[in-house]
Amino acid sequence: MLPPPPPPLVSQTMVTSTYRSIHVPKMPLNAVRCAATSSQSLKLGRNPTVPSFNISPENKQKTVPVITRRQETGSNSKSVPHPKWNPLQRIAAFALDKFEDAVIANFLEKQHPLPKTADPSVQISGNYAPVKETSPHHNLPVSGQIPPVINGVYVRNGANPYFDPAAGHHLFDGDGMIHAVHLKDGKASYACRFTETERLIQERSIGRPVFPKAIGELHGHSGIARLLLFFARAALGVINATHGIGVANAGLIYFNRRLLAMSEDDLPYQVSITQNGDLKTVGRHDFSGQLNSTMIAHPKLDPVTKEMFALSYDVIKKPYLKYFYFSPNGEKSSDVEIPIDGPTMMHDFAITENYVIIPDQQVVFKMPELLRGGSPVVYDKTKTARFGILPKYAKNAHGIKWVEVENCFCFHLWNAWEDDSTGEIVVIGSCMSPPDSIFNESDECLNSVLSEIRLNPSTGKSTCTPILAPSEQVNLEAGMVNKNLLGQKTQFAYLAITEPWPKVSGFAKVDLFTGKVEKFIYGDNRYGGEPYFVPKDPCHTGNDEDEGYVLCFVHDETTCKSELLIVNAANMRPEASIKLPSRVPYGFHGTFIRSEELDIQS
């Protein structure tokens, strides 16, 4: 499953970074019994009864097992130094821990039952449960034949909490973990490692989670209490928030000879891939001191200019949104402040040859809602979605043109291009409804409709049209087009079939011109995640844009085995399956780094 994106909840003014917060819809999880018995499972902090769901009939008889405690052994048992506290800080740390346990956890939070969106028994059960790190395993069993052109490393990010949840927990609260499959000369190896964020390093040293979980914990009055506890720990020097508090668990991009792991709540983290196929965190990457704000998890890499374009948003203070880009060698442009009325959740955007397309949609942040006992993430039903069209190299936002689009809310935008015949901007995205079902519990089933959005900057008019015929409609979320054609007109998109929502039962190859859909279904009780398209030719931009392969992790919930599938994108037939040595939880976004790129890592 690939849930929607993480927005930040605390501004840099307050703690020099931002939190991220997102709510995944109610989860009709098919349980995997292996998660209850595997040595790679983690114990939940409590054993609540799993709530009922509005789910598809085939899932109604399934139950979610309680995950048993994992002993801290193996590769997760790191020898870490204790915090260098002075006597006053030791006393403060002890007192604040006792306050958290006695007042917040056992009084404020016990008064209110956990919603499904913060219940650990729902959020990290089954194959959403965390795993231990795995050192490189080589010469993995391969069924079929790995295509000769697939030489490199497929890496995928995901949330993997290091500690048992002490209170509420949401899937997106977990620490970042990267899963890597190294493919070379028909052979495969696998490893997975935590991204060593400053947050994880400090919590591991202290021995308990001390940074707030923006989704699972920061709501209502208990959320305010946890924020105050966080600020008290920071003010007394028990923790250091000046080096970032992010989890780096959402996106991955390879840019300027660096693999960057990202989430909206911090700077990116650089991760290197060793010759042995292992992963090593280099540290927070501020582009040689040029980046001093957060960066969203979906920056765009222009395949022609090799420039990287990005956004940064703040939920507390103006400017609420900034746009910037980097030259191929990592030189950052000046920030362009984008005028929006208030803090808005903005996980993704799009680029064309000449423009950047910026969505300003209906899910907004209202921090006073915490005082009223609610969530600061709010669906503003009075707001109409709009898209800003800004020249890529604009020095300011004076020339931005906004076009409103009725009944449109997109978490992800797959591509965009300029239609010279009509003067319109064409945007391909998945429109979700109702928007607030992602953030707040809803009795309505969530729909994700692949759509063509046409924006006319001259007239200010727009259209939003489903690409699939009504008889073919399925939820499509998470995926991509051929990255060689990003920002240009594309015929095909490869998207996860999130059926039954939010699980991924296969992926679809969609003809964006005709609406034709070809499906690759993983099989009974088998689910995956984001399909990643690897073109045969890394530079080719000809008519045969579907010449390449789709890579995706797939997990069999019956056998508790995970694998990496390689599917021929042209004929939608499997080419190879790599059997993995350990379970790979459902995760988020990935990328593929070719061998020649690995050889010149910075």
Image (cartoon, rainbow, N blue to C red):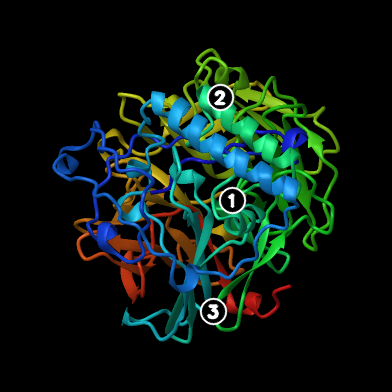
**How many angstroms separate mark 1 from mark 3 (CA)?**
23 Å
Q: Is residue 448 above or below residue 238?
A: above
Q: Is residue 274 above or below residue 565?
A: below
Mark 3 vs mark 2: which is more N-terminal? 3
**How many angstroms separate mark 2 from mark 1 (CA)?**
20 Å
Q: Which residue is mark 3?
A: 277
Name the residue: 19% across, 45% down. Answer: 63
Mark 3 vs mark 2: in front: 2
The dot on residue 147 is none
Residue 525: horizontal and vertical position, in percent?
21, 56
Instruction: Assign the C terminus to one quadrant of the image.
Output: bottom right
Mark 2 vs mark 1: which is more N-terminal? 1
Name the residue: 81% across, 43% down. Answer: 393
Q: Which residue is mark 2?
A: 376
With 324 as the anchor, is 5 left or right in this view? left
Residue 161: horizontal and vertical position, in percent?
47, 53
Name the residue: 58% across, 24% down. Answer: 364
Q: As shown in the figure, which amino acid type bears the numbered disc 3?
A: Gly
Secondary structure beneath disc 1? loop
Q: Which residue is mark 1?
A: 247
Secondary structure beneath disc 3? loop
With 412 as the anchor, is 528 left or right in this view? left
Residue 531: horizontal and vertical position, in percent?
42, 57
